[in-house]
Image: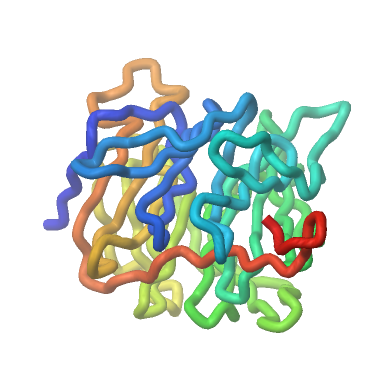
């Protein structure tokens, strides 16, 4: 039986956006606007604190501590000790409050980010693509709560969950332009909601199932071939990493629980058979003030 264990003692309100990068493990606490890195012994070190929600980030290639982020109502560049540098605010609506949610970079160096209404308005969310020249394009409408943009190693397949509907969708990606096809249903979840996802080196897909306290593993053909019980009710984000890529890191949440258990909100880890690879970086081509950005 596969078992998980907590990393450190920190308990997050809404742990998400966990990524294994060349800089180590990072993760977000969305509604408190905090970006953490994992230090020795599993302690979480606060790197950035924002006065608005921080959904997820990706490293910016060629920098030591710059990140591209899905935050507040848009996309920005983050560096510790500096104010955010905004690329776009595509979800700044006067009539209904929206925020950005999960996000990830693809192997081609683009950044993809989902948005949602605070009240999870059905069909109100969207998926955005940030191209390497900094252009932000709305590529999918009609999502409710998009989660887990996850890519295969060749960048030609995107997995995206619409969490309230219990669906994981699969899209073919044009590697040159980033254009998506019409998509297809990859898997459905009957109990709980599919949340964060990651693709392993075998083409299988891990999905955190919010509300069910489970981690699902699907084969590339969509067949569910493993279910791991987690010691938390709301697993949210996950990634594969560690020295050999075989550690599955899982974030969780305490938000909405009247009686959270001792591990709700914890960062968890467990060992798996098939490894993953570090998170992709955003590789910008645009310039600011005559120099490469950021």
Q: How is the image coloured?
A: rainbow
- In the rendered image, the residue lying farthest to the front is 290
User: Tag count in the figure?
Assistant: 0
Q: Is residue 135 left or right of residue 222?
A: right
Name the quadrant of the C terminus: bottom right
- In the rendered image, the residue lying farthest to the left is 1
- Residue at 43 percent of width and 69 percent of height: 199
- Residue at 62 percent of width and 76 percent of height: 108
Q: Is residue 211 left or right of residue 158?
A: left
Task: Say whether residue 191 is visible.
Answer: no
Residue 191 pos. (x, y %): 42, 46
- Residue at 71 percent of width and 47 percent of height: 75
- In the rendered image, the residue lying farthest to the top is 258
- The vertical placement of 241 against 251, above or below, is below
Task: Say whether residue 45 is visible.
Answer: yes
- The vertical placement of 199 against 213, above or below, is below
Residue 84 pos. (x, y %): 68, 39
Residue 281 pos. (x, y %): 54, 65
Name the quadrant of the N terminus: bottom left
Front residue of 127/87: it is 87
Front residue of 169/113: it is 113
Which quadrant holds residue 213? top left
């Amino acid at each position: 039986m596969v078992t998980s264990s907590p990393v450190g003692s920190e308990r997050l309100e809404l742990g998400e956006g966990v990524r294994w990068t060349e800089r180590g493990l990072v993760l977000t606490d969305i509604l408190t606007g905090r970006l953490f890195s994992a230090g020795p012994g599993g302690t979480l070190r606060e790197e950035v604190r924002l006065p608005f929600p921080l959904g997820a980030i990706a490293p910016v290639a060629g920098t030591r501590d710059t990140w591209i982020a899905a935050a507040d109502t848009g996309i920005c560049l983050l560096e510790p000790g500096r104010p955010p540098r905004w690329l776009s605010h595509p979800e700044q609506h006067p009539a209904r409050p929206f925020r950005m949610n999960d996000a990830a970079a693809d192997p081609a160096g683009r950044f993809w980010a989902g948005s949602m209404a605070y009240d999870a308005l059905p069909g109100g969310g969207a998926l955005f693509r940030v191209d390497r020249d900094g252009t932000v394009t709305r590529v999918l409408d009609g999502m409710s709560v998009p989660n887990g943009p996850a890519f295969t190693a060749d960048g030609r397949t995107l997995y995206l969950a619409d969490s309230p509907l219990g669906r994981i969708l699969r899209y073919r990606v044009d590697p040159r332009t980033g254009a998506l096809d019409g998509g297809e249903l990859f898997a459905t979840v009957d109990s709980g909601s599919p949340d964060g996802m990651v693709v392993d080196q075998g083409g299988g897909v891990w999905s955190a199932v919010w509300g069910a306290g489970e981690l699902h593993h699907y084969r590339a053909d969509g067949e569910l071939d493993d279910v791991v019980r987690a010691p938390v009710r709301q697993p949210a984000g996950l990634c594969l990493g560690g020295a050999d890529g075989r550690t599955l890191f899982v974030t969780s949440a305490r938000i909405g629980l009247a009686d959270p258990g001792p591990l709700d909100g914890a960062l968890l880890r467990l060992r798996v058979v098939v490894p993953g690879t570090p998170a992709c970086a955003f590789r910008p081509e645009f310039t600011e003030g005559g120099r490469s950005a950021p």
